[in-house]
Amino acid sequence: MAELIFTVDSALLSELGEKLVETAHIALVELVKNAYDADATLVTVKIVPHRRHGPEVHVVDNGSGMTFRDVENYWMRIATTHKQAQDVSPRYGRPRTGSKGIGRFSCRRLGTQLKLLTTAALDDGYYEQTEVVFDWSRFKPGKEITTIKCEGSRERLKDASPGTTLIISGSPIDEWSKRGYDFLKRQLAVLAANRGRKRAGFEEDPGFNVSLEAPDFNEKISNLREQLLSAGWGDLKVRVNSGGEVACALDALKVGKKTITYPKKLPDLASVSATIGIMPVGRVEMRNREVISKGSLSEILDDWGGIYVRYKGFRVYPYGEPGNDWLNIDRDRGIRRTALSEILQPFAAKLRGVNPQRALLSLLSSKSYIGDVEIGERAIGFDPKASREGFVGEAGIAALQEIIRFAIDWSTIYREYARGLAAKEEARDAREELATQLRHRVEPKEVVATAIRVVESEVRNLATQLPTTERQQVLRSLRTATQAIAKHEASGREELRHLQLVASTSTLLLIFSHEVKSLLSWLEQVSISLDRVRRQVKEAEARKLAEIRDEFGTTKKRFLDLLSMTSLISVHSRRSEAVRLTLRPRLERAIRSFDLITKNYEIEINLDHVPGTLQVGPMLEAELFAVVLNVLSNAIKSVIAAGGRKKVMVAAERRGSKVVLNIRDSGIGLDEEHYERVFAPFAADPDKRLYRGLDAKLNPEDQYIVGTGSGLGLSIAREILSYRGGTIRFVEPHNEWKADIEIVMP
């Protein structure tokens, strides 16, 4: 009986390398996965351009390498099952990423020539270096694989470093597209997310990282994990200096770079630092989609999400491990905790659209924060247990938890604020789309009414095709719905207008508070004088003076109680009507509000160029004061900060149906690049000169009137004017003036 055996044609390599692996980008990912399986901690990938052929690819890792026998038995054997038998890596216990034994033929997909250089440790303390050259063009269809020899050599070395280098060249075409290259980065970022883990029975895995160089794409990434952490919505950094001052810095989508200092100094945490990536799974909250995608990020967070703790460079467990909620993030999400800590509530209250009592609803799960907290040499109170499972005592970790959680909650406030900005942008885009369809401009205040008209028109047209009874029912429902929308929108706009006016009274409140405190100081002096006089007069007069003194004391206490309780001035704007207003007397009243400051600092405010009969409106008087007070307050701050001769000039004239009011000052000025930026909420001092100048020149007691502002004044002024059909902007100043703000009113 004749026996038959299978033989393997060289065409199989083409099937495995070129057809099973669809693109060069997938092929390269497979080679890096092999390095990961070989317990490498760093892989360097270079895609080097070539003038006549496709690029040359270098993959260099510091893994365990292969001996000559390993190359012979595993690398040179097709579809070997050794990865199935050993489903974790030998040194760190990593779950293997490959198991079919064909990943190495990805090299065939990348080029016709492969040089393999690999070094592995031997049991006797020496190293073995193996070099093999593969010429894939020799593996032609019709030839058996076993008959084709590959040139190789091996060398025994005393000193060497384990690892494997692959150099692939000879690709007849260049198929490296930007889209494919970005796919490569995203896949490698999943591997680079490994920041280290301890697995029972193995050495502690220190993590895995990738260096990537691709001149054709003008890119050189020395640390892919670092890019990964900055690819999400934001990256958060915490640093504690030698004096215990805790500085937090956030760089995030839509809010840019922000900083805050923790209100308490914690010297025991000196040399502590943290870098944390904030990674919500949603495309709209990704800053760099070349590094992460929704799919790859989900995989990263499942395997490597969490904030680890390292002490003098070594990981301390179980902080950041699955199920370890050391920052109480998942606990707070589980109990639906909504309110911020008392430390952060005042800060959140200043951000438009952020509710301090509900801000924590935007807190992400603990896995969505990826990063490391490093405890340096100078930190006190951190004594790791012998097992490195936590620290002895809780003093140090409790303080560490306090500042890291403070930083995360602070970033959550800004994320809530950014989501509000995104909603405004979506509304603006919808308005622009509506305007495009209607072929005319739609003002913000007209969006709802215009949209209702469009919907009504479309529904009425469609309803004409319905039977009479159904048509009437549809039209009744339409009328009810559109009326409800219109009434709700009108109510909301009126409420917003009211809140804007209430917020704008903060300047008057501060002035009033300052005046009352001066009065209280005077009452205290009068009481002391009355006591002296009382001791020198007859008994009847003394009793009378005592009564007066007691009345002063009661009045003082009443004022102090009122000041402590007063946080808002109610403006009866909802019952007021828009009317025509004579401008000059209102300007005079607004300027008188600042008399205490203008006299103390010798500020000249000139109204000579405002006609006495000029009228503006129709608008509410409170709206006019809100605009004028905010702009005057900024001008006064600017001239004080600048020093020298302090001058403000107010000029007004009618131009057609509008009144143009200019308020000019001789202060510190404003760079033209910030002319528009200062109208955004909380962009109070973009040049970082105003409040520095005020700090140097203001008397301490005057901080109450012209100290740090809310950053809302110009934003509110623009909203009010826009509603009334007006505008406000900075224009180029002339002559002696450093700033000129132009206000156009109906």
Image (spheres, helix red, strand yellow):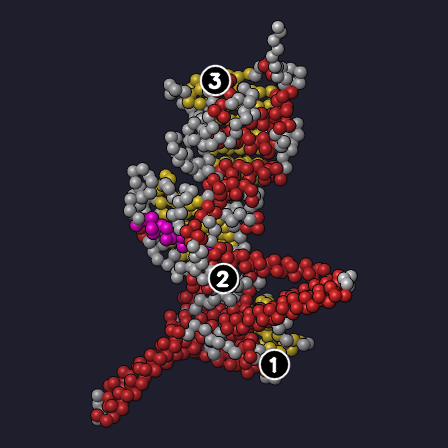
What is the secondary structure assignment of the residue under circle 2? Answer: loop
For the question of whether residue 153 can be seen, the reply is yes
Q: Residue at x 40, y 59 (%)?
A: 341
Q: Amino acid at mark 3?
A: Arg
Q: Check residue 232 for magenta coloring.
A: no
Depth-wise, is mark 2 or mark 1 nearer the camera? 2
Q: Position of residue 325 (x, y in %)?
A: 40, 47
Relative to 541, 228 lies left or right: right
Query: Pointer 2: what residue?
Result: 354
Query: Pointer 3: what residue?
Result: 69
* Contact check, label 3 and label 2, Cβ < 8 Å: no
Q: CA separation, marks 3 and 2?
A: 65 Å
Whichever of labels 3 and 2 marks the residue nearer the N terminus, that label is 3
Q: Amino acid at mark 1?
A: Val
Whichever of labels 1 and 3 marks the residue nearer the N terminus, that label is 3
Q: Position of residue 686 (x, y in %)?
A: 51, 61
Depth-wise, is mark 3 or mark 2 nearer the camera? 2
Q: CA separation, marks 1 and 3?
A: 95 Å
Question: Which portion, as a residue range, is magenta?
Answer: 395-412
Q: Position of residue 585 (x, y in %)?
A: 55, 83
Q: Residues within 10 Å of mark 2 (few under 14, many from 20)?
A: many
What is the secondary structure assignment of the residue under circle 1? Answer: strand
